[in-house]
Structures are given as C-alpha cells and as structure tokens.
Amino acid sequence: MLVTTFLIIFLSLAIIIQFWALGDLAFTKRMESKTLWYWIVLLFPVLGAMFYFQSRKKVIRVFNPKFRT
C-alpha cells in the first residue's frame, strides 16, 4: 500500500516536471538547440528535465526606474 502510494506520487511528479520542461522549452527564445533538448527531455523525462532547468540561462531583470525631477 505504501509502495503504490509512493509510486503514484513519484510518477505524478515526474509527469509534471516533464510537461513543465517541455512547456518552458516551447515558449523560450533563449536557446539555440531546442530540438536536442526536446529529445533529451522526452527520452529521459526526470533527468532530462533536471538537466534542462539547470543548464538554461537565467533571466535577470533589473528594476531601474527613471524619475523626473
């Protein structure tokens, strides 16, 4: 009973992280080799998604307001 519950939770999280990686990959404009990442995430769902999130470029937004004086 405990093993099946753990397996269901693990598989659910694996599916969520895989779709999250594929969705992020589909809408990003920061990468050049998208096709390679699609194959990596599809063939190795958990490890591929983890490597994708670790290797993507981080977007750093700087808040620099210009006030009129």
Image (cartoon, grey):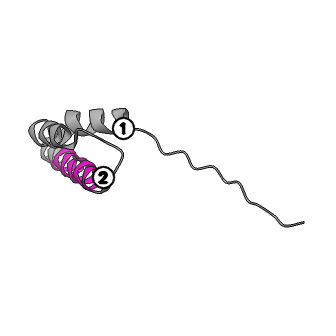
User: Which residues lie in the magenta part?
Assistant: 8-26
Q: Can you identify the residue that label 2 sits on?
A: 24
Callouts 2 and 1 close, C-beta under 8 Å: yes
Q: Which residue occupies 22% across, 49% down?
A: 9
Q: Where is residue 24 in the image (x, y as percent from the top left)?
A: 30, 52
Q: Earlier in the sequence, mark 2 or mark 1?
A: 2
Is disc 2 surrounded by few (<14), some (14 to 19) or many (20+) residues within 10 Å?
few
Q: Where is residue 37 in the image (x, y as percent from the top left)?
A: 20, 39
**In the image as oriented, which residue stretches furthest toward the front?**
68
Decide which of 12, 69 is in the foreground and name it: 69
Q: Which residue occupies 35% across, 32% down?
A: 55
Residue type of the residue flagged with mark 1: Arg
Q: Where is residue 54 in the image (x, y as percent from the top left)?
A: 36, 33
Q: Does dot 1 land on a helix, a strand or a loop?
A: loop
Q: Residue 56 carries which label?
A: 1
User: Does residue 66 appear to the left or right of 62 in the view shown?
Assistant: right
User: Does residue 30 appear to the left or right of 5 in the view shown?
Assistant: right
Q: Residue 14: say if magenta.
A: yes
Dominant SS in magenta: helix
